[in-house]
Amino acid sequence: MPPTTATAFGAGRWMCALWLAASLGACRPAEPAGDPVRALFANGAAWVDLTYSYGAGTIYWPTAKPFVLEKVADGETPGGYYYAANNFSAAEHGGTHLDAPVHFARGKTTTDRVPLSRLIGPAAVVDVTAKTSNDPDYRVSVADLEGFEQRHGRLDSMIVLLRTGWGSRWPDRKAYLGTDATGPAAVPQLHFPGLDSAAAHWLAGRAIKALGIDTPSIDYGQTKTYPTHQILFAADIPAFENVANLDRLPETGAFVIALPMKIEGGSGGPLRIVASWGAIGRVGAR
């Protein structure tokens, strides 16, 4: 069953402590034995990086500017020490990234204003891989979500992650997108699963924290009007796209931290997303 409100609160308290510790780790003393943050990394705590690296092969939307890394310095300096630095440029929406609600909903939350409460929390992994294997245009349905709830409990206040199996195709651009073409002419050739618009309405009614998926978009590839984006973002629910390694998460019991690049006024941005399970309940119960 998904964590109760009390369990989620306790887990959230310790995960926020972890996040703060990671931010301040360079200037704080060694953690004492038995510290709850250290316990999260003890034996039995499983951590998974759900993020693809950014590089020349990172998959972007066919019309988007890809990731470019420009080397500025890499070598010994006249002062005798080594120094490396780079410039990078890219579209907001590519690789593992956040879609902020303003991406498809005027006046809704921008990247820098998405609250941490929507980016950190218990996760539910809805597995539809059996249905997508022979249907690249599959749309996750209300029936799929209701089936999950019948097995595990309600999805209220969860970060919902849709596992379609598409991650096994990364980084093969043609297999992942349905085409290796670029530019506007490539968009009608896109084929990959997404979330049905009726299911988007249903999830908005559950007041979920966020929606993630292991495909390029929460709308399926052949969409013309992106209704799933419009529906969820009108409800101020953000999305995570191109999420990696969902096959390594349990259906319930994981806890997600998804921290995007904080672009002021942005419609999205690169996202580092990780998940843990195993130690959360033990630590939160102390």
Image (spheres, rainbow, N blue to C red):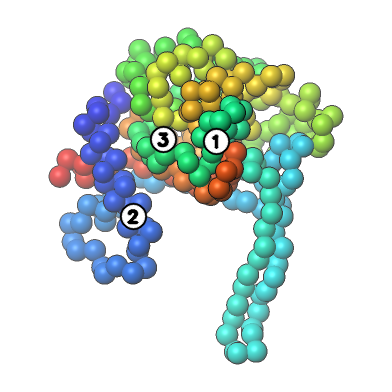
Can you identify the residue that label 3 sits on?
Answer: 118
Q: Residues within 10 Å of mark 3 (few under 14, many from 20)?
A: many
- Secondary structure beneath dot 3 equals helix
Q: Which mark is residue 100?
A: 1
The number of numbered discs placed on residues in the rendered structure image is: 3
Residue 113 placement (x, y as % from top left): 48, 41
SS class, disc 2: helix
- Distance of label 2 from label 1 (alpha carbons): 23 Å
Q: Are marks 3 and 2 in contact (CB under 8 Å)?
A: no
Amino acid found under the numbered disc labelled 1: Ala
Q: Residue at x 53, y 23 (%)?
A: 234
Which disc, if any, is residue 67?
none
Residue at image position (65%, 66%) is: 86
The earlier-in-sequence mark between 3 and 2 is 2
Residue 194 seen from this side? no
Residue 285, percent across and down? 17, 40
Q: Which residue is mark 2?
A: 20
Q: Left or right of 116: which side holds 87? A: right
Q: Is residue 88 above or below residue 137?
A: below
User: The residue tagged with tag 1: helix, strand or loop?
Assistant: loop
Q: Residues within 10 Å of mark 2 (few under 14, many from 20)?
A: few
- Amino acid identity at mark 2: Leu
Q: Amino acid at mark 3?
A: Arg
How far apart marks 3 and 2 lie (CA) works out to 17 Å
Question: Does the CB distance between marks 2 and 1 fall below 8 Å?
Answer: no
Answer left or right for 184 relative to 51. Answer: right
Pick the front one: 102 or 259: 102
Q: Nearer the viewer, residue 105 or 202?
A: 105
